[in-house]
Image (spheres, coloured by chain):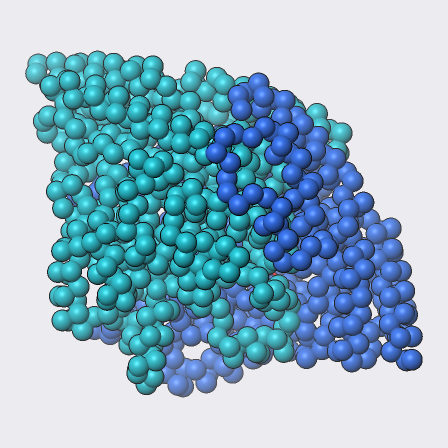
Chain colours: A cyan, B blue
Amino acid sequence: MDTAEFRRRGKEMVDYVADYLENIEKRQVYPDVEPGYLRSLIPEEAPEQPETYEDVVKDIERVVMPGITHWHSPYFFAYFPTANSFPAILADMLSGAIGCVGFSWAASPACTELETVMLDWLGKMLNLPEEFLAGTKGKGGGVIQGTASEATLVALLAARCRMVKRILSDDPERPEADIISKLVAYSSDQAHSSVERAGLIGGVRMRKIPSDSKFSVRGEALRKVLEEDKAAGLIPFYFCATLGTTPSCAFDYITEIGPICNTEGIWMHIDAAYAGSAFICPEFRPLLDGVEFADSFNFNPHKWLLVNFDCSTMWVKNRTDIIAAFKMDPLYLKHDHQESGIHTLHTHTHTHTHSICHWQIPLGRRFRSLKIWFVFRMYGLRGLQDHIRKHVALAKEFEALVRVDERFQISAEVVLGLVCFRLKGSNDLNEALLKRINSARRIHLVPCQLSGRFVLRFAVCARTTESRHVQEAWAHITQLATELLRHVER
Amino acid sequence: MDTAEFRRRGKEMVDYVADYLENIEKRQVYPDVEPGYLRSLIPEEAPEQPETYEDVVKDIERVVMPGITHWHSPYFFAYFPTANSFPAILADMLSGAIGCVGFSWAASPACTELETVMLDWLGKMLNLPEEFLAGTKGKGGGVIQGTASEATLVALLAARCRMVKRILSDDPERPEADIISKLVAYSSDQAHSSVERAGLIGGVRMRKIPSDSKFSVRGEALRKVLEEDKAAGLIPFYFCATLGTTPSCAFDYITEIGPICNTEGIWMHIDAAYAGSAFICPEFRPLLDGVEFADSFNFNPHKWLLVNFDCSTMWVKNRTDIIAAFKMDPLYLKHDHQESGIHTLHTHTHTHTHSICHWQIPLGRRFRSLKIWFVFRMYGLRGLQDHIRKHVALAKEFEALVRVDERFQISAEVVLGLVCFRLKGSNDLNEALLKRINSARRIHLVPCQLSGRFVLRFAVCARTTESRHVQEAWAHITQLATELLRHVER
Ligand SMILES: Cc1ncc(COP(=O)(O)O)c(C=O)c1O
Ligand SMILES: Cc1ncc(COP(=O)(O)O)c(C=O)c1O
């Protein structure tokens, strides 16, 4: 494909994308295919000779679309949202064309620099404490991770490194393996599975702190577990607080937990993967109060801030904590200089500006800040706030509908764009309802379990979801519920 | 921005991208900016109100381009290539619009399924042993990681888990921390820094095996270190072999190392980040001989196979080894089912088809296989082979030029698209030459050190590099060398 053909095909693709998104609500939100459906639709091997673009493009509808769960359909209410906006798509095209790999400043200065400035912009929008910003001289700063899971892991590794160093500085003879075997990381029993996974990767113990009746961790609950663990000779080193839990969008009490962590020398990381975007609205910012006690904070603009995947923004108070966890020890570095300078030149030359590859698991990275820049400028802070507020209002609208129907109950406080609800009745009944809903394919939901109860989650997801979709969804759910209840009574 | 405006702006962006790539060789390959240049060019905060698209787009040339290192300029000979092709850009647009997050089969079946089939396609192109393919029933299979660094880490974690389990099954009383403190991972002293980093993250010892005079690890060298370490009570568990080292594109002797690893129960992972793409050509496939001894194999189509970043393909012989390393222990899983079913439903529902999130560090993932599919079909195997062969021929052309100039020497065997060369003379002299080259800004190179010598690396990188660019580059280098030598003599 030469440039001339790319011009033509690119414009066709722009139209295809526009058509897809414009008409997405006419597509069935959840696919009918069975596992393994795709293999038989395409050849077993790559072609020897080039195919024509027509051949390729016609397979989008034949092969791909039948197996797509349409996350951007206004009838998609499952999981949490994943962001999608036109300015982000445009910026991503540009990023793909530039195709630089920003593992160091020199590898593409604009890539590192725009990222740092965008994280400052966003930090200010969230009213983060100054310490988290890079500014021109701060110790803190932000970085784009691929996902919240990576941020949680990076923070845990930094915390592990900080605690090991601290203990070794008091007791240089203590074997590192002995220290690590005593470390304990904590999170809510409502925390995302990626927290447990981070512990598994980091090779440390994990303990879940019981959440309260509103699914939040309180300071007292943490304190109790800490006392037990310290009495048993363990070393608490990391607490991953969740603001906006995956099951029910509950909020840990970081104003209570934070001071405890600070006193105990425990690294507090905040995972606000979904809810974080809302903190750009003054009315939701109080939910972030207590962030001043945190060592690191992360949320996903790729969930709810109109910046396409992947873009998970992370701030730390102290860059050197993170960098220390990923840097080779000085001896190796020295060796590295002597023996294989290329590594050095890939990563260590520009120490006067921080090499972002020391902040993350992967070495290479795309020019991801471009899409933040495009989105923030094309929407403005106001436009982004409108987006959040609209989704919250739609969730409240749905909540109100549920509340007037006596057969249903609300299962958790509705704070942002998620409504947890269920039929009054058994888990089996609710499971049957969900099955009917998802089998009908008009809307798509996923469940959660709260205090042993099977609960339906209604998350406002698509950028284009409007009141009519919510009303329609509710009418559909109640109709299926009526049928189900009639069926059960019989 | 509504759909109508997106149609217009999208087409403008297609033209901008086409213009950029068509005229890239007129741009200065390496930027003039100083660290911190960008911050002063843009406001300190995000705008309150939306800006116009014109405002945003004119800043591409004003703010971004002055700070770009143009990786796709035919005058870029630094690092290793990063891929860029029109079909991949088109596929990425589509992937952005679909915007699904493929963490499980249900989250978007096409995303998981196309990935599995594409990895089989590519596995066949590489003539990988059948065991690495998923087929319809195999135990092995492939997955797309973001980067080679992640693949190296994932393999190390799987190896750690396998060895810990193996030892515990013989000696169930032995504390896990004690086992982990005895584990040793190995790689060449030429291995990429990401291997060392994986060891750091996994909390295990790392040892470098000395490479031979051609920068390759031989079986004997590994065997010697293994004997030492076993005698010292350590537990060898992982060897990361490199095919195509970063400094000089050297190849470890996996036909010698592999059998040793198999006998000793050591997990052999192969990192062929750059060189792997070449193995689709029958004449280079012998470089991969010995892969049959490996537990996992990885390379980056996003380096040299025309699939834009990020796309690092990894195959394993035994999927369950990988999954085991990331899965929570059964007790937690049970708890998970009871208390927070949402996690379960996010990740564990479709166990009859493997959930790819158990193969990687991040949970979310883009629809990355689309770009493989587009590229392989639009180029065909033949077109991809042509691309590799052209780059290798250009490197040989450059090597021949170097060899006829008596002032220069070749520093490592030229096997693929990388030429390591230097002026006969001191490291300082060569450092001065590189400085002149990069300061002139007509071409861009990075150095490496080989056996204590400062060496210049000439890597054929851009898809559009032709003989004339190589000839021009050499003429330029020799002119600068002549000036330098005259200056030094004075
Ligand atoms: C609270 C929370 N943390 C982490 C994650 C995982 O996000 P990612 O896919 O970015 O790792 C989620 C996803 O829904 C989440 O809700
Ligand atoms: C041999 C080798 N391994 C790993 C890497 C790192 O690749 P990635 O950025 O995909 O992690 C490189 C990069 O050049 C490499 O040459």
Q: Could you tell whether B479 is left or right of B234 in the image?
A: right
Q: Nearer the viewer, residue B7 or B91?
A: B7
Q: Quadrant of residue A203?
A: bottom left
Residue ID at (75%, 73%): B431
Residue ID at (29%, 15%): A471
Measuring from the top left, give residue B153's x and y in whole percent. 45, 60
The answer to whether residue B307 shows anywhere in this view is no
Measuring from the top left, give residue A88's x and y in whole percent. 53, 34
Q: From this viewpoint, which residue is outermost toward the left?
A: A489
Q: Quadrant of the C terminus of chain B?
A: bottom right
* Number of disc labels: 0
Residue ID at (14%, 36%): A453
For residue B204, above or below residue A225: below
Q: Quadrant of residue A107?
A: bottom right
Q: Nearer the viewer, residue A149 or A35?
A: A149
Q: Quadrant of residue B452?
A: bottom right
For residue B220, above or below residue B412: below
Measuring from the top left, give residue B54's x and y in whole percent. 64, 29
The answer to whether residue B189 shows anywhere in this view is yes
For residue A448, above or below residue A402: below
Q: Could you tell whether B337 is left or right of B313 in the image?
A: left
Residue ID at (23%, 52%): A255
Q: Nearer the viewer, residue B273 or A356?
A: A356
Measuring from the top left, give residue B202's x and y in whole percent. 40, 66
- Ligand 2 rendered quadrant: bottom right
